[in-house]
Image (cartoon, rainbow, N blue to C red):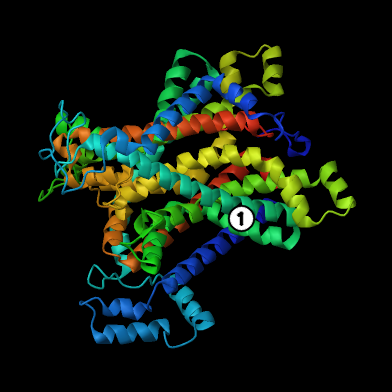
Amino acid sequence: MATRFILRRLGQAAVTILLIVIVNFLLFRAMPGSPDRILARNPYVSPQAIQQTRERWGIDRPLIPDQLVRYVGATLQGDLGFSFAQRGRPVTDVIASRLGPTLLLFGLGELLAIWIGLALGAYAGWRRGGPIDLIGNGISLILYSMPYFLLGMILLLIFASTLHWFPTFGMTTIGARFDSPVAYVADLLPHLTLPVATVALGLIGQYSILMRSSIIETLSDEYITTARAKGITEDRILRAHALPNALLPTVSLIAINLGYVVAGAITVEVVFNWPGLGTLTVEALSARDYPVLQGVFLVLSISVVLANLVADMIYGRLDPRVRS
Amino acid sequence: MTTPAATVDLAPLAPTAPAEHLFRRIVSRPDGLFGLVILAVFTVLAAVPDLLVGPLQTAVTATGGRLQPPSLAYPLGTDEIGRDLLNLTIHGTRISMVIGFLATAITIFIGGVIGIVGGFAGGRIDAVLMRITDFFLVLPTFVLALILAPIISDVIGTGSTMLGIRTTLIVIVIVVGITSWASCARLLRAQTLSLKERPFVDRARVIGAGRTHIVVRHILPNVVNLLVANAVLTFAGAVLTETTLSFVGLGDPFQPSWGQLLNAAEEVGAPNLGAWWYFVPPGAGIVLVVFAFTLLGTALDDLLNPRRRTRR
C-alpha cells in the first residue's frame, strides 16, 4: 500500500511538471511576434543562429502538436534556449551559475527558521497567554506583514551602513583572491549573515504562527486530557504527545508556503546584491530576457513541486493514516 | 481543521443579521477594533490626498533639496530629486489601496465563480476546475506573475491610462488577480458543496426552481459572509504582492505606489546612504495596512465563517 501511495504521488508530480512545461510553452507563444522575431531584435544574434532557431523550434510547422512536442522534448533534455541579454549564452548555463548562491542563502535561512520558528511557536502555544506568547505573537504578526525586502533594507541600514558590522553587498569582497578555502569562508560569512538573517526572520514569523496554532489545537484534544489524568508529567506530555502531532500539519503547511517564500527570496537578493537566481530574475525582467525568465519560472516551479512531493513523503511516513 | 465538514452549521449571523450587530461584535474585539481604526485612517488618507498635502509632486514641481533628512518644512524629508516624501507617501496610500482593491475584486470574482460553479455542478466540470485550482495552488504564483506582467504589458501596451489609472498598474491588477484566486475557489467550493445538500436547496429544486435561480437566490446569499471575510484577507495579500512586484521594477514611476517608492529608495541606495526617511514611511504604511487587514480578516473569519477554522 505504501508503494502505491508513493507511485500515485510521483505520478501527480510528473503531471504537474508536464503542465508547467506546457504553460511555459503557451506563454512564450502568447507574446506578440514569434520567437525568432524577438531574437532578430538582438544585435548579438547572427542570421544563422536565427535560421537554426527557426528549424529547431519548427516555427514553420503548426503550433500544436509539432511545436509543442519539440518544445517539451527540448525542455526534457535540459535545453531551455538562449539568453537574449547575455549574448546568446545557453539559459541552462546562466541559471546553473546562479543556483549555488541561492541554495546557500535560502537553505541556511530555511533551516534556521524551521528550528527557531517551530521552537518559538511551540513554546508560545504551550505557555499560551504568557509573556513570551504575547511578545512573540506580536512580533511574529509584524514580521508576517512585512515584505522580506523591507526587513532587509532595515537590517542593512542598521547593521551595515550605520554600525558597519557587516559589508553592504555581494557574496565576497570585490577583487579579493583567496589562497585557501578557509580564507574564502572567512570572507563569505560576514557577507552571508545579513541576507540569511533576513530570510530567517521573515520565515520565523510565519512558522511560529503556524506552530503556535497547531499546538494549541492539539492541546485541546482528548488524548492530552487522558495523558494528564494518567499523571504523566507536563514535560513528557509536550514532548511525547503534543509535539509530534502538532508537527504534522506544520510540515505540510511549510511545504505549501514554499512558493511564497521563493518570492521573498528573490527580493532579499536584490537588496543585498546577492548573485543568485533572484537578482538574475530582476535583471532578466528589466532586459525583457524572456528565455531566462521562463527558465527561472521552470526551475523554481519544479523545485516547489518536488519540495511538496518530499513533504508528502515525510508526512506519509510520520502519519500512516495519510497513506490509506 | 479537526471539525468534520459534515456537520457544518450556518453562521449564527445569517445574511439576515443586521449589519450593526456585526459591527458591534467586531469593535468589541481588540483585533477587530484595531483593524477597523487603521483601515479608517488609511481610507481617509487615500480618499483626499490633495486636501492633505496638495497635488502629487513631480520632478517639475519639486521644491526641496536632494535627499534632505526630515525638517520642519519637510517632515519626512525629500527624495533624490527634491520631492516631499510626506506628499509622495500619502499619494502612495491611494495608489496602493486602489490597486489592492481592484486586484481583490478580480481575485474574489474568479475564485467565487470557479468555486461555486465547481461545487454546484459537480461531476466532470468540478473535477476539471479543481485540477486547475490545485495546479495554481502548487505553482509559485509570484514568479508566474513576474513573467506574465511583461507579456501582458506587451499585449495591452504601456504609457496610456485607463479610468485614470496608468496601464502599467492595470497590468499589475490583472496579474495579481489571475494568480491569486485559487485558495478562494477551494474555500467556496467546499461551502457550496455543503450548502447544496441542505434541505432548503432540495425544497427549491422540488418546487421546480432552475439552476441559476438556486445559485443566485439560495447559494450566493449564504456564501456572501465567507466571501467578505476572504476578500479582506485577500486584500492584505494583494497589497503585499503589488508592493513586491513594484519593488522589482514593474511599478509606475508616474503614479508611485508604496512599493514603487521602496523601489526608488533601493535604486538610489537609500539604505547604504543612511536615508531611512526614504523607505521607512512607505514601509510603515505597508506593514500597518497588511497587519490591520490580516487582523480584521481573521476577526471577520471567526465571526462569519461557519467552519470557524482557527487560522494562523
Asked if residue B71 is positioned above or below residue A4 in the image, the reply reads: above
The furthest residue to the front: B51
The furthest residue to the right: B206
Where is residue B248? Give x, y as percent. Answer: 31, 51
**Res. A243 in view:** no
The residue singled out by tag 1 in the image is: A9
Q: Residue at x 63, y 48 (%)?
A: B186
In which quarter of the view is residue A165 placed? Answer: top left
What SS does tag 1 mark?
A: helix
Label 1 is placed on what type of residue?
Answer: Arg
**Res. B277 in view:** yes
Asked if residue A188 is positioned above or below residue B284 in the image, the reply reads: below
Q: Residue at x 57, y 40 (%)?
A: B230
Asked if residue A251 is positioned above or below residue A42 in the image, the reply reads: above
Going by the image, does A275 lie left or right of A26? Answer: left
Going by the image, does B14 lie left or right of A149? Answer: right
Q: Residue at x 60, y 33 (%)?
A: B301
